[in-house]
Image (spheres, rainbow, N blue to C red):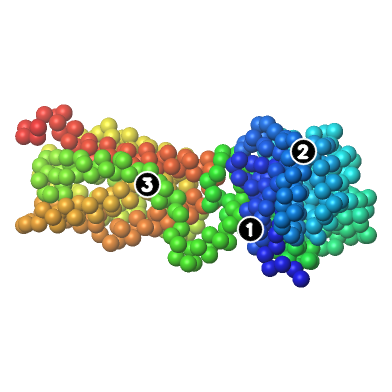
Amino acid sequence: MSPRVPRVLAVAGTDPTGGAGQHADLKSIAAMGGYGMSAVTAVVVQNTLGVRCVHVPPVEFLAAQLDAVAEDVEIDAVKIGMLGSVPVIETVTRWLEDRRPPVVVLDPVMVATSGGRLLEREAEDALRAMLGHADLVTPNLPELAVLAQEEIASSWAEALAQGHRVARAHGTLVLVKGGHLTGDRTPDALVGPDAPKPLVAFDGARVPTENSHGTGCSLSSALATLQARHGDWAHSLRIAREWLRGALERSGDLAVGHGSGPVHHFHHVQDALESWGAAPARFSDELWAASAGVRREIEELDFVRGLGDGRLEPERFLAYLDQDLQYLDGYSRALTLLAARAPDERQRLFFAAGAVSCTETESELHRARLRHAGPGAAGAGPGEVTRRYTSFLLAATAAEPYPVGLAAVLPCFWVYADVGRHLGELAAAAGTGEHPYADWLATYADEGFQEATRTARELLDEAARGASPAVRERMREVFLEACALERDFFAAPVAAVRLAGIDGIE
Ligand SMILES: Nc1ncnc2c1ncn2[C@@H]1O[C@H](COP(=O)(O)OP(=O)(O)OP(=O)(O)O)[C@@H](O)[C@H]1O
Ligand SMILES: Cc1ncc(CO)c(N)n1
């Protein structure tokens, strides 16, 4: 009877960044409902950018690991990955001869996705000689060519024919994988020794991502696990492919490394966690936490305290409003640029509406105040911080990737909404009588503004999910830069008024 939770052993090398090798195997085995175990063949110093060096422990040590597992645990399937050298191949072969588990999947690892050899060239013959021990061999196209001792197939039809020659020569099943084909399809097919026609073939559109570190390891260990449970290779391949597609599509949820990143092995578990009410980890939460220091500095500014308790001198407030009006002009243009670049109608409308509201509602409030204060209240041109902040916004929204533009405009929503909420509390605490800035405070504490802030945050999280690690890093930088500019902006009117030497301020 097939075990409900198959016990699957990965015999493979390591990847300290967790995306390939036995780390990917253990995650994939667990993701497919198996119990994962691992014996180390080689300790590999690598990351998502490349392989740095390889240490092969004495083979006696590997043999002892294999025996320790087999003497204690009934192994339902084994997945063999990186072997590296002839003595390692011979050790694993001897173990298979003695204690072969019912399912053996061999991924003939030769070169990492990131480049870097993982099999010595002189070990290729020994690896070929081992193929007959496997039920299924899962080479990528360059590995298939080495096994066939032929040129790399340049079309899918050639790859299938080559797969059949390897299957026939070694009496095993071969999974011919199209991951290395050029073009937008990634077909996979199972080819047996008896006929060139595949036993089963699947096709699918290539997932547009650079995050393919460890896909081969992940697919082969998922297949070993599913096969131990179902005993049907075609069915196992169908499920494994569907899962791997999700793992590739959701790889952007992970922010791991600067090169070809890992796939998200547990994307389905993340969905389950969210459906159980576990708070999803949001990229915006990370950014918010990183900005805590700057936000504290904002709350401690004289200007902000005075605005909250109503004691702020009117001159300071007018100097601030004057700059804010000019700032809003730039901000509105930045939102318009984002609207033009938005990938869908919802986002386009959101930013276009934001641009309108900025110019009409908020600016009107400012103008009314400035008019009320009489001639001379409006200063000359934009101050240094106003100029710096608006130039930064326009550059980010016009010339950087769209998600980076989103990160640049978000603090103006979010920090303001947060300061507005904080000011509301200060105003309530100050309590008595008419608050001189009540109408102004109300705009930012307003539910409509808070709602717009929530939407802008959701859009940023959505964009971050599809972004590369490099773009996410840039989003983080730009978000923090915008928060620092918010702080400088709140601090500027005091500085400017001081510089102008207006009486009664110091
Ligand atoms: N961008 C992609 N979109 C969809 N499927 C992909 C993509 N990249 C890889 N795959 C699938 O992943 C599986 C393994 O791919 P591939 O042939 O590239 O393995 P590999 O080179 O052995 O991987 P690695 O060396 O990274 O472990 C195949 O089923 C392939 O179709
Ligand atoms: C240890 C190990 N095995 C396999 C691969 C192939 O991706 C890798 N990069 N590292």
Q: Is residue 316 left or right of residue 406?
A: left
Discs 1/2, front:
2
Q: Are marks 1 and 3 in contact (CB under 8 Å)?
A: no
* Disc 1/disc 2 C-alpha distance (Å): 27 Å
Q: Residues within 10 Å of mark 2 (few under 14, many from 20)?
A: some
Q: Which mark is residue 52?
A: none
Discs 1/3, front:
1
* SS at mark 3 in the image: helix
Residue at image location 38% in from the left, 40% down from the top? 480
Which x, y percent locates residue 214? 67, 47
Q: What quarter of the picture does the C terminus occupy?
A: top left
Q: Amino acid at mark 2?
A: Val
* SS at mark 2 in the image: helix
Q: Are marks 2 and 3 in contact (CB under 8 Å)?
A: no
The residue that label 3 is drawn on is: 289
The reply to whether residue 409 is in sight is: no
Q: Residues within 10 Å of mark 1 (few under 14, many from 20)?
A: many
Q: Nearer the viewer, residue 135 or 316?
A: 135
Residue at image location 41% in from the left, 50% down from the top? 284
Say above or below: 143 vs 74.
above
The residue that label 2 is drawn on is: 59
Query: If you read the primary sequence from the N terminus, does the residue marked by circle 2 or circle 3 appear first?
Result: 2
Discs 2/3, front:
2
Figure quadrant of residue 200: bottom right
Figure quadrant of residue 269: bottom right
Which x, y percent locates residue 6? 70, 62
Residue at image location 42% in from the left, 39% down from the top? 477
